[in-house]
Amino acid sequence: MHSLKRESSNDEASGALLSSRTAGELRSLCPTLYLSLNLVNALELKVPPLVLVLVLAVAMWFAAMQLPSFAITLPWRHGLPVTISGAGILFILAGGYAFQKAKTTVNPTKPDAASSVVTSGVYRLSRNPMYVGFLLVLTGWATFLSHSLPFLLLPVFVAYMNRFQISPEERALSAKFGDEYETYKHAVRRWL
C-alpha cells in the first residue's frame, strides 16, 4: 500500500528517496539505473538558486554571442527587459523581506532550518516568489539579448528548480510543519 501511494504522486515519487526494499531490488536488477538515481538525488538542494541563475545567465550570453544568426528583433529592447527584470527583483526582495519579518532562514539549501511557514505578503501569490523573481530576471536578460536560444534555457531553469530545489523543500516543510504546510500548499500555487 505504501508503494502505491508513492507512485500516485509525481512530485513525491520523483524526488523521494527509494525505500530500502525497493532500492535493494533495483540494485540487483539494474545497478546502473540504481547508481544513476542516487546521483540524481544527490543533486537535491546542492546548487543554490542564485548560482544556477548566474550559470544560466552566462550560458544565455554565450549562446547569443556564438550563434548570431539566431538573433531576433524585439520591440522595446531596452525598456522591456528592465521592466521584466525589475518586477523579478521586486519579487525577490518581497520574498526575502517576508522571510526576515518571520525570522526564518533564507538559505535555500537548508529548508529543514525553517522556523515557520511564511504565508503573508507575496507568499499569498506564490509559494516560491524568490524563484519566480529569478525566472523574471532571466526572462528580462533573455529579452535584452534579443536572441532565440536564451529563451530555451528558461524551461531548463523551471525544470531544474522543480526537481532539485522545490520538491525537496516541499518534502522537508511537509515533514516539519505537517498539516499547516499541506493546507498552504493546496491553497497557493507553486509558481504563479
Image (cartoon, helix red, strand yellow):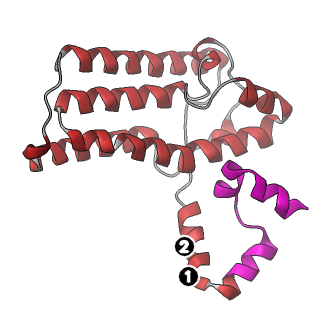
Q: Is residue 29 above or below residue 103?
A: below
Which residue: 13% across, 28% down?
73
Q: Which mark is residue 129?
A: none
Q: SS for tag 1?
A: helix
- Which amino acid type is marked by label 2? Ser
**Magenta region's main secondary structure?**
helix
Residue 15, x across and y down, in percent:
64, 55
Residue 120, x across and y down, in percent:
66, 14
Q: CA distance from mark 1 to mark 2?
A: 6 Å
Quarter of the image for residue 44 reads bottom right
Residue furthest to the bottom: 28
Q: Which mark is residue 32?
A: 1
The residue closer to the viewer here, 14 or 89, is 14
Which residue: 11% across, 49% down?
67
Which residue: 60% across, 21% down?
99
Q: Is residue 83 above or below residue 35?
A: above
According to the picture, the residue beneath numbered tag 2 turns out to be 36
Quarter of the image for residue 191 reads top right
Which stretch appears magenta? 1-26
Q: SS for tag 2?
A: helix
Q: Mark 2 and mark 1 in contact (Cβ < 8 Å)?
A: yes
Residue 5 magenta-highlighted? yes
Residue 21 magenta-highlighted? yes
Task: Report the quarter where the N terminus lies.
Answer: bottom right
The residue closer to the viewer here, 29 or 122, is 29
